[in-house]
Image: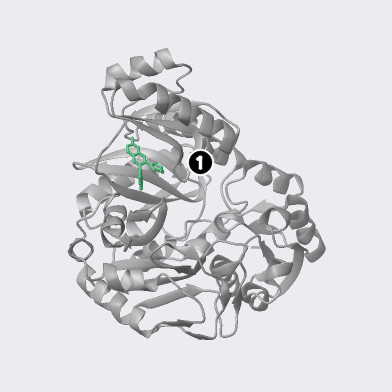
Amino acid sequence: MFKKILIANRGEIALRVIRAAREMGIQSVAVHSTADSDAMHVRMADEAICVGPPPGTDSYLSMPAIISACEITGAEAIHPGYGFLSENANFVQIVEDHALKFIGPTAEHIRIMGDKITAKETMKNLGVPCVPGSDGGVPDLDEAYKVGDEIGYPVIVKATAGGGGRGMKLANSKAEMENAFRTARSEGKSAFGNDEVYIEKYLGTPRHIEIQVFGDGKGRAVHLGERDCSLQRRHQKVFEEAPGPAIDAKTRAKIGKVCADAVASINYAGAGTIEFLYENDEFYFIEMNTRLQVEHPVTEAIFGVDLVQEQIRVAAGEEMSFQQKDLEVNGHAIEVRINAEKVPAFTPCPGKITQYHAPGGLGVRMDSALYDGYSIPPYYDSLIAKLIVHAADRPTALARLKRALGELIVDGIDTTTPLFDALLQEDAVLTGDYNIHWLEKWLEANTPE
Ligand code: MV4
């Protein structure tokens, strides 16, 4: 096992990894920018090293600075958390070239899944159900029209390098194809330096269901059920739950096995998430994320596992600590993402926390790097806390969430907690009857001029 690992991240996820490492007797090294000298991850790690000025590109994303920090501190492996360098195949290659271990999948798997066309082709060949659409890339408008006629409108044109909803354009009819095709192409080019696009049948009211998988890199893999992450605003998840309110045990076992078998057959290593749109009882693959996700705690809660410790184990060449038969759903978990933002406009709201009190009690987990007197810097993501509740069933989890939100105190700045107080009054949230458009529509209907 590693003696020391470096965490190439900040905030709550850096704490998450430090805690996992400490329980395993592994020393942790925090890296930080000059804006984060007082950050909790710096205080909590065994060692900390400054890697540059505040902009991410000059510190948390600086590969030479991160590699140097490993060499100076003697860290043997790097946990990237999520975001930053977590899905950068070139970084993984550089880490390995320096005889360090990347705690995550191989550069090749990251590269395959980072390109949506090769990801979809790979998954399709492995028997994973995909959205009907073009066979790979669509080189020109003539070909786009052909695909549109074949699969029928509406269709969606997607940039192969896209993400976060960028480089994605809807065409409701043939008349809209030219604009959708050209816009998706040019957004792909400008945002990602890649103008390759593909086309899919547009699904009108699906849920976003994602399957958690975990592989040992040697041909064995398991699934840990699904998360329903349909409640999103501008492609940012705000509320996630497991199990999915629309998924029963039989459905879970079936799609789960397809996913586990798929990643086992490519020797996938570590944590991965296979994203689907789910409509009329059918799954349609859209993307795979080759990292630990923000919402992983809801899966940990219902399966009673530590996904970060498992990532570290597999990266160190040890066996996975669980097999499929050990993994059973227990109860229901919900996560809400608390951001330093002022509703209703969701304006970023950095500043000094004058009073902080985290909720607690049975079935409550607060993953946050906040503390009394901490100043949230303006340079990074506005996620400041994840509140995760776990209970025997969904109604009890909802009651627990309401109770825990009532205990939370974050004074000095605005946060998105009022959004959750309001959502917990909504029938669709209480019954689980929502899809990917529900939250945006609700916000539109409930936002003052
Ligand atoms: C789609 C879709 C409908 N049909 N693909 C949005 C970002 C990217 N992850 C995939 N996205 C979508 N792909 C087809 N064929 C609708 C969306 C979509 C969406 C998906 C998941 C969660 C929220 C969403 C909000 C708007 C659109």
The furthest residue to the front: 449
Question: For the residue labelled by badge 1, is the local secondary structure a helix, a strand or a loop?
Answer: loop
Question: Which residue lies at the image location 76% right of the left edge and 54% below the top edge?
Answer: 67
Image position, residue 301 (x, y; %) = 37, 68
Between 18 and 208, the one lying in front of the other is: 208
Residue 73 placement, left or right of 229 = right
Asked whether residue 331 appears in the rendered view, the answer is no
Q: How is the image coloured?
A: one colour
- Residue 46 vertical placement versus 270 (above, below): below
- Which residue was labeled with disc 1? 267
- Residue 331 vertical placement versus 256 (above, below): below
Label 1: few (<14), some or many (≥20) within 10 Å?
some
- Residue 169 vertical placement versus 393 (above, below): above
Image position, residue 215 (x, y; %) = 47, 49
Quadrant where the C terminus lies? bottom left
Between 152 and 96, the one lying in front of the other is: 152
Quadrant where the N terminus lies? bottom right
Question: Which residue lies at the image location 31% right of the left edge and 75% below the top edge?
Answer: 401
Question: Which residue lies at the image location 43% right of the left edge and 25% below the top edge?
Answer: 181
Image position, residue 52 (x, y; %) = 76, 61
